[in-house]
Amino acid sequence: MKKTYKLIDLDCANCARKMEDAIKKLDGVNDASVSFLTQKLTLDADDDRFEAILAEAVRCCKRVEPDCEIVLK
């Protein structure tokens, strides 16, 4: 399953790269992309565990950029 989420207050491209690298290392993630320019996260992960993987991706993002919010709507 592949979904895209809006990011709010992502401050720099370096943080985006760190977030992307951390998410790609998670078990069950097929691919991930964090774009500073478009302020979006695209996550491609296993369908059956997608919600759990998304929750872990959010935690990874918070560790790198505590002020960044991922809109999960």
Image: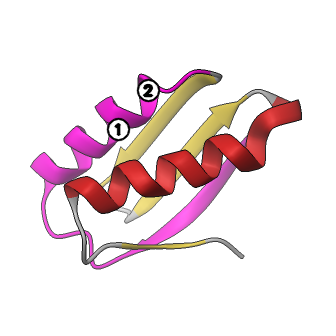
**What amino acid is at disc 1?**
Glu
What is the magenta range? 1-27
- Percent of width and height locating residue 27: 57, 21
Residue at 44% x, 39% y: name it: 33
- Percent of width and height locating residue 63: 26, 56
Regarding residue 36, the answer to whether it shows in the image is: no
Q: Mark 1 points at which residue?
A: 20
Closer to us: 60 or 10: 60
Regarding residue 62, the answer to whether it shows in the image is: yes
Residue at 21% x, 54% y: name it: 64
Q: Is mark 2 on a helix, strand or loop?
A: helix
Q: Residue 59 carries which label?
A: none
Q: In the image, is 45 to the left or to the right of 6?
A: right
1 versus 54 height, above or below: above
3D distance between C-alphas at marks 2 and 1: 6 Å
Label 1, residues with CA under 10 Å away: few <14, some 14-19, many ≥20: many
Q: Name the residue under label 2.
A: 24
Which quadrant of the view contains residue 49?
top right
